[in-house]
Image (cartoon, grey):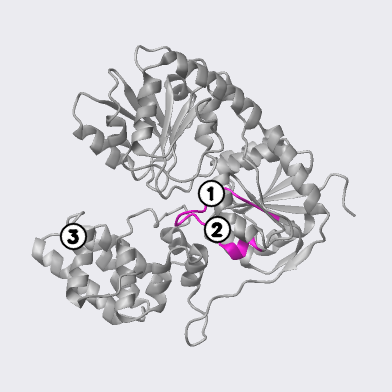
Amino acid sequence: MMSSRPLVLHAIHCLTSGGASQAMLALAAHATSRVRILSLTPARPEAKALAESAGIQVVDGPSFPQALRALEDADIVLVHAWNAPELQEFLRSELPPARMIVWVHVAGRGIPQVVAASLLERSDMVVASSSRCLQHVAMAGKSCPLSPRTILPSCDLTRFSTIGRKVAGHCTVGYVGSLEENKLDPNVVALFARVTIPGAEFLFVGDGSLRPVLERAAAALGDGWKFRFAGHAKDIVPYLAEIDLFAFPMARNSYASADLAIMEAMSAGIPAVVLVPDGHNDMIRHGIDGIVTHRDDEFVAAIATLARNPARRAAMGAAARERAIRVFSPPRAVREFDDAYAEVLALPTRRRPAIGRRRDQSGRPVPAGVDALLFAFDSKWPAVEESFRAEGGRAIAADMAIASAGTAWLGRSTGGLLHYLRRHPLDPWLIFWRALGFAGQGLPVRALANFERARELGFPHSPRLELYRDILLGARTHTGHAVAGTPEIPAFVESVLDRVGAVETSA
């Protein structure tokens, strides 16, 4: 018999200090229900300690049978979802009778951070973490018993709301967050350089693969510009005390939904200027506690305007702090989820059959790694499936689309190819696609090693593989040495297309 206080199991790929985990911990710590956390992979020690200090039991890195028992014991399972192979595998499995809500923590608009529609359709209710997110999950959510909705995440902002401002003689424009091209516009330094404010300083707090690129771009501007890269910081409070204006130009394919860094900045009394290529931002009231822009020129102009106007910055900062305390506090999220729980509890529990592997043209199950990646990308990037299934010119065109796609889709820990390859290290197709990525980045030695490894593991299309190897070997012979950046992306792709002639490029 169900208790008057239902047991909610928060299921997550991994309990960490990241934004989704912080939103989960805030919701769990202030809950009116009983709560338990299921971390499918071993939790980070500091995050697990936070949960346990709040009296929350963590089922940490369980075996598959233990995870299933945790589901059976719960009255409601609240899945905190984004693209991660371990979470996907678990949700695709045959699941015992349960009531399930899926809360999507990514915008879901760009590879690799999408959430497969067939996973969302297994839930009783889909909850989006922002209106940007809802645009991309609503269709799948309508197939569930209960209508989809948006619930903004919350977090504990207490330590930020009391930050005192450090008064300086110049304006410090700051960004706090990961320096990755699937989150931050890689042209951010050039954008900041267009803000012609005497004495302005531009501060980056965070780390990632973009950092050396941004540092080189800043150095190329010369001594007249003041850029500072602080790297990763366990405690960002001292940096927020320095920042006068939070500036966040989102990447075109950004996976950000409701960004924790914006919440923290607003709670510290810092107005934000955000460049959102699509949709709008639920967190900022445009013109009141920040500015939402949609074009580069708007973004640059907004920063310049606020940098020159301390009084307006202060007014917006005060409004931002008030909104953060009122809207981003855990009690608001708890109330909205309690309403969702009440609706879900009125439903019976139900089993969920397993979602089986895809099959090839001959009816055989496709390799596990290929199946996992194709399922995860959910037809959002046709080039990968075309590379796997097509032949001849169409397959080569798809391969070249993969080689030209940059690095964001590789995602070592963000649902990209390398994340899935870590889970399926012997899948020749995943290794072949990694080789294409290296070739496109101008890393011929790594590409050749991966093509050879794919061949050893039984990659089935030898002519394609040998074509690419021959071209890379020819490029090395031509240059005389293997230098990162040679051949460049267009050079490799053009060499392939020149060799094979005109191919279909619709992939």
270 sits to left or right of 346? left
481 sits to left or right of 298? left
- Name above or below for residue 354 compared with residue 287: below
The three-letter amino acid code for the residue at tag 2 is Val
Q: Distance between the residues labelled 3 and 2?
A: 34 Å
Dot 3 alpha-carbon crowd within 10 angstroms: few under 14, some 14 to 19, many 20 or more: many
Q: Mark 3 points at which residue?
A: 487
What residue do we see at 48% from left, 76% from top? 367
Identify the mark at residue 453; answer none if there is no mark: none
CB atoms of marks 1 and 2 within 8 Å: yes
Residue 376 is situated, as x and y percent measured from the top left of the image, at 51, 63
Dot 2 alpha-carbon crowd within 10 angstroms: few under 14, some 14 to 19, many 20 or more: many
Question: Earlier along the polypeptide chain: callout 3 or callout 1?
Answer: 1
Question: Earlier along the polypeptide chain: callout 3 or callout 2?
Answer: 2
Q: Name the residue under label 2.
A: 115
Label 3: element kind: loop
Residue 491 is situated, as x and y percent measured from the top left of the image, at 18, 62
In the rendered image, which quarter is residue 196 located in? top left
Magenta segment main secondary structure: loop
Q: What stretch of residues is rendered in magenta?
A: 101-121
Between label 3 and label 1, give the one nearer the viewer.
1
Q: How far apart are marks 1 and 2 (CA)?
A: 8 Å
